[in-house]
Amino acid sequence: GQSLEQPSEVTAVEGAIVQINCTYQTSGFYGLSWYQQHDGGAPTFLSYNALDGLEETGRFSSFLSRSDSYGYLLLQELQMKDSASYFCAVRDPSGATNKLIFGTGTLLAVQP
Amino acid sequence: DAGVIQSPRHEVTEMGQEVTLRCKPISGHDYLFWYRQTMMRGLELLIYFNNNVPIDDSGMPEDRFSAKMPNASFSTLKIQPSEPRDSAVYFCASSEGTRAYEQYFGPGTRLTVT
């Protein structure tokens, strides 16, 4: 089967840098996505890595190492509004499908 | 673009009643997904459609749940009869076939069954 592991909670202070890790076990692999969800809101797409390396989008960066089945989301210059849950997700490799499998999410608390 | 639209935003109903949730995907998106989110079980995929055809309904919990997509701009998720354990936030999402990794979620329907 497929599984993704993330830390359940991370705490950091405003202005700092935080890294949220994701390890996955899948029978095939088509890339790693990251989503953000604020309390009471809907998940929103942040980034996607199909190949190894770092993808940067403003204050957020995402990294992938396919050989290690590992990725992370890096948030720089943390702001209070970054307090949210962050989910990694992989495309279901069990055939020609657009289904995503989501991790259990990491709750990021940014403190002043 | 208006994004994915869901209605109602909140629904409170009594056990045994029928509940219908509605979704309008983003125009041009050929995939539509229904998810359920709870604290205990996280984000679960219930069913998804491609070009209005149900592709995978393995996540539908039981026969009380049904979903339809009569055309490219409308889908419904029906629960009949509803039970307290169905209380959750139900999200609809859509995506383009070539960008499977990027799903756009609606605001969700918060369902409470008493």
Image: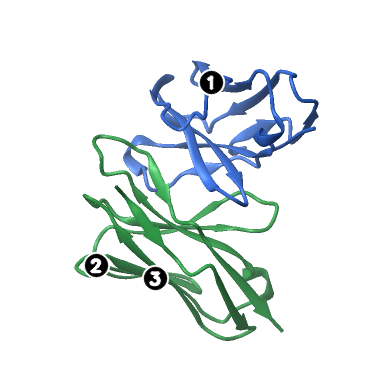
Question: Is disc 2 placed on a helix, strand or loop?
Answer: loop
Foreground disc of the pair 2, 1 = 1
Residue corresponding to mark 1: B67
Q: Is residue B114 above or below residue B104?
A: above
Residue B93 appearing in the image? yes
Q: Specify which label sits upstream in the sequence, 2 or 3.
A: 2
Residue B59 location, x and y as percent?
Answer: 46, 33
Dot 2 crowding, Cα within 10 Å, few <14, some 14–19, many 20+ = some
Question: Do the residues indicated by labels 2 and 3 lie within the same chain of the protein?
Answer: yes
Identify which amino acid the numbered label 3 is placed on. Tyr
Residue B51 appearing in the image? no
Colour for chain A in the figure: green
Identify which amino acid the numbered label 1 is placed on. Ala
Question: Is disc 3 placed on a helix, strand or loop?
Answer: strand
Question: CA–CA distance between discs 2 and 1?
Answer: 38 Å
Q: Is residue A63 above or below residue B87?
A: below
Residue corresponding to mark 3: A72
> On what subunit does the disc labeled 3 rest?
A
Question: CA–CA distance between discs 2 and 3?
Answer: 11 Å
Residue A89 location, x and y as percent?
Answer: 40, 54
The chain letter corresponding to blue is B
Which residue lies at the image location 26% right of the left edge and 65% below the top edge?
A69
Left or right of residue A30: residue B100: right
> On what subunit does the disc labeled 1 rest?
B
Are discs 1 and 3 less than 8 Å apart at CB? no
Residue B76 location, x and y as percent?
Answer: 59, 21
Out of A76 and A2, give the one closest to the viewer.
A2
Residue A13 location, x and y as percent?
Answer: 63, 85
Which residue lies at the image location 58% right of the left edge and 20% below the top edge?
B64
Left or right of residue A73: residue A10: right
Residue corresponding to mark 2: A52
